[in-house]
């Protein structure tokens, strides 16, 4: 079982839809949670960064962390074609092997006109 | 503009021919790292560096070398490339380690025949 699980998609939604992207994890030592967006032929870019549990909102994007369920989500409101990309979750914390950052494999999102 | 610059963007080579992929950042970041990205496996860390002259192995270091002689540069060296090193490579940097947001380069697509 992977330490971080993420549905690869692809996920196709109409423009204006609310998108929910999710990751589950098994390591309770993770404390920092991030979402990266990766456009085709580009490097990942940081979208959201949260520490511990709770919600964080930035424009159309909301990140949620539920540490009790080991589950994180990214919501995109009023989705746009420009949101079409691969979304990677990532999480880090001090584990038995030291400070560790682990990425999910990414969910491919397509927002259609 | 704050950025991580990798060169080359695309590289095709033959088995056994030594190559170097360069990485440079202009943000005065302490931490730099190399990742490879493969379908279904996500981003896996090859090597990282917490500071000048300090490097350490990541999850998949076999067949790779790195050096950190200057703060801004972190080249990735493949002494004797093999076909299983065909992949998309990303250099990344952050202000203070893996718990800080990573800034990624735009990637180097390497093909080893």
Image (spheres, coloured by chain):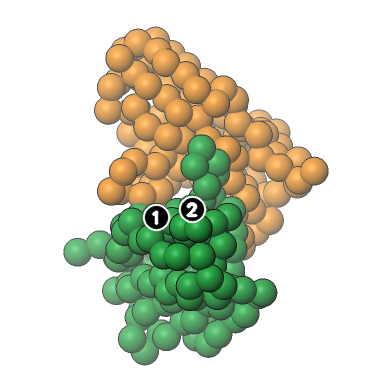
Residue A79, image x, y percentages: 54, 67
Q: Residue A105: percent from the left, percent from the top? A: 35, 55
Left or right, residue B74 beside residue B46: right
Mark 1: which secondary structure?
A: strand
Q: Which of marks 2 and 1 is nearer the N terminus?
A: 2
For the question of whether residue B33 can be seen, the reply is no
Q: In this view, does B50 lie above or below B84?
A: below
Residue A82 x, y percent position in the rendering: 58, 55
Q: Give the crowd class for mark 1: few <14, some 14-19, many >=20 residues within 10 Å.
A: many
In the picture, which chain is green? A
Residue B81 as seen in the image, left or right of residue A54:
left
Query: Which quadrant of the view contains residue B111?
Result: top left
Residue A12 in sight from this viewpoint? yes
> Which image quadrant is residue B9 in?
top right
Judged from the image, the secondary structure of the residue bearing numbered disc 2 is strand
Q: In this rendering, is residue B107 above or below A37?
A: above
Q: Which residue is drawn at 30% across and 63% down?
A: A7
Q: Is residue A64 above or below residue B35?
A: below
Instruction: Report the chain holding disc 1.
Output: A
The N terminus of chain B - image quarter: top right
Mark 2 in CB contact with mark 1 (< 8 angstroms): yes
Q: Quadrant of residue A19?
A: bottom left
Q: Are marks 2 and 1 on the same chain?
A: yes
Q: Can you identify the residue that label 1 sits on?
A: A108
Name the residue rendered at 52%, 47% in the picture: A39
**In the image, is B23 to the left or to the right of B111?**
right
**Residue B91 position within the rendered picture, expressed as x and y whole percent measured from the top left:** 55, 40
User: Which chain is in orange here?
Assistant: B
Q: Mark 2 lies on which chain?
A: A
Q: How many marks?
A: 2
Q: Which of B13 and A14 is in front in this view?
A: A14
The residue beneath circle 2 is: A85
């Amino acid at each position: 079982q992977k330490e971080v699980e993420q549905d690869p998609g692809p996920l196709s939604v109409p423009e204006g839809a609310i998108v929910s992207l999710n990751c589950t994890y098994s390591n309770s030592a993770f404390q920092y949670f991030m979402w990266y967006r990766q456009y085709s032929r580009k490097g990942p870019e940081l979208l959201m960064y949260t520490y511990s549990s709770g919600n964080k909102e930035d424009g159309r994007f909301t990140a949620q962390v539920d540490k009790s369920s080991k589950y994180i989500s990214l919501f995109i409101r009023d989705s746009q074609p420009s949101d079409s990309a691969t979304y990677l979750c990532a999480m880090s914390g001090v584990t038995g092997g030291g400070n560790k950052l682990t990425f999910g494999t990414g969910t491919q999102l397509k927002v259609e006109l | 503009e704050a950025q991580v610059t990798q060169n080359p963007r695309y590289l095709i080579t033959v088995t056994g021919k030594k190559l170097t992929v360069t990485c440079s950042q202009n943000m005065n970041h302490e931490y730099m790292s190399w990742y490879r990205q493969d379908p279904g496996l996500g981003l896996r860390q090859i090597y990282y560096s917490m500071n000048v002259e300090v490097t350490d192995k990541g999850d998949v270091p076999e067949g790779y070398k790195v050096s950190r002689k200057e703060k801004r540069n972190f080249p990735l060296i493949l002494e004797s490339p093999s076909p299983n090193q065909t992949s998309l490579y990303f250099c990344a940097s952050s202000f203070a380690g893996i718990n800080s947001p990573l800034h990624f380069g735009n990637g180097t697509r390497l093909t080893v025949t």
